[in-house]
Image: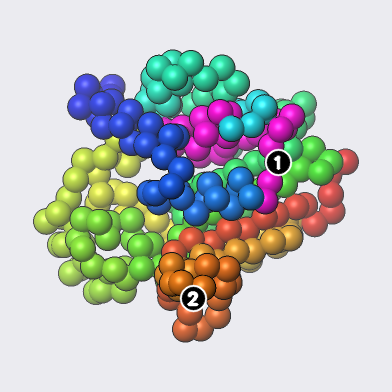
Amino acid sequence: MISAAQLEEGIRYAEANYRDNDQGHLQVDKQLIRNKFDLNGAKVLDFGCGMGGMSMWYADNWDCEVYALDIDSHHITVARKVQEKHQIKNVTFSQRNILNEPLESHERFDWVFLNDVAEHISYDILEQIFRQLSQRLSPEGRILVTYPPWESPYASHVTHAVKIPWCQYLPQKMLTRLIEKNNQQIVGELESDLVSAYKGLNHLTHRRLMQILNRSGLTPVYRRSHSIINRLPGMRELNLSFFPFKYLITKEFLLLRPTTQVK
């Protein structure tokens, strides 16, 4: 069961992700989605929704219906508390593993978002998930995947604790000791601290993701590689993904459609 301290921390984190548009790690995500996509009238699936901050942001900013799924019960508990507090009606949170409880044929979505979740799932399972999601899209449905690639300065998910960018390239025994020294509890039933969160990463890169997508029957129609360079004056729109700039990428965005569009 989630503790009172975990619940309080989770609510604070989820509310910040929901309400804060101009700073934080989701700022670029929100800007891109707002500028490029129209979710009005859409049926949206937020897959791996975590504590629901982005789910509620979609629901609050568009006239859409949001279905938000996560396998972690603590995350869903937090999300429902924040939803109740802010009285957001057009989002439904469910704890669900779609490999054990697959999406049914009538469950069709215009948009599927995987925000900062793909890097936490083993490759074989990720392929199964993408294959199932591609089959549950509406005729013009699209999937948006966002994630920090493994080359990223922040890809380890523990940079804020160990204070070393690109720390994933340190010798693993050394890094493990650093994480253990600076370990923190996090709001998760399945990943409850930074050590387990780091060990759960799949070291996802664009090349590896493309291999998975090709086998899953999905094709990219848009790619955006946001990097440290985009913070510089006049460099905001640069889209650099090749060597050596790939080591400066902080977030990848891939918009996908089925290779053969599902009817």
Name above or below for residue 163 compared with residue 199.
below
Residue to which mark 1 is pinned: 38
Tell me the kind of residue under disc 2. Lys
100 left or right of 192?
A: right
Residue 61 on the magenta span: no
Q: Residue at x 54, y 54 (%)?
A: 146
Tell me the kind of residue under disc 1. Asp
Q: Which residues are magenta?
A: 36-60
Check disc 2 and report its element: helix, strand or loop: helix
Is residue 204 among the parts visible in the rendering?
no
Seen as rendered, the residue at the extreme left is 181
Q: Position of residue 123 (x, y in %)?
A: 53, 57
Q: Name the image quarter holding the N terminus.
A: top left
Of the numbered discs in the image, which one, if any, rests on residue 246? 2
Residue 41 on the magenta span: yes
Indicate which label's residue lies in the foreground, 2 or 1. 1
Corner quadrant of residue 66: top right
Q: Position of residue 62 (x, y in %)?
A: 64, 31
Task: Say how many tags the image has.
Answer: 2
Q: Position of residue 133 (x, y in %)?
A: 68, 42
Q: How is the image coloured?
A: rainbow
Q: Residue at x 40, y 23 (%)?
A: 82
Q: Residue at x 24, y 51 (%)?
A: 195
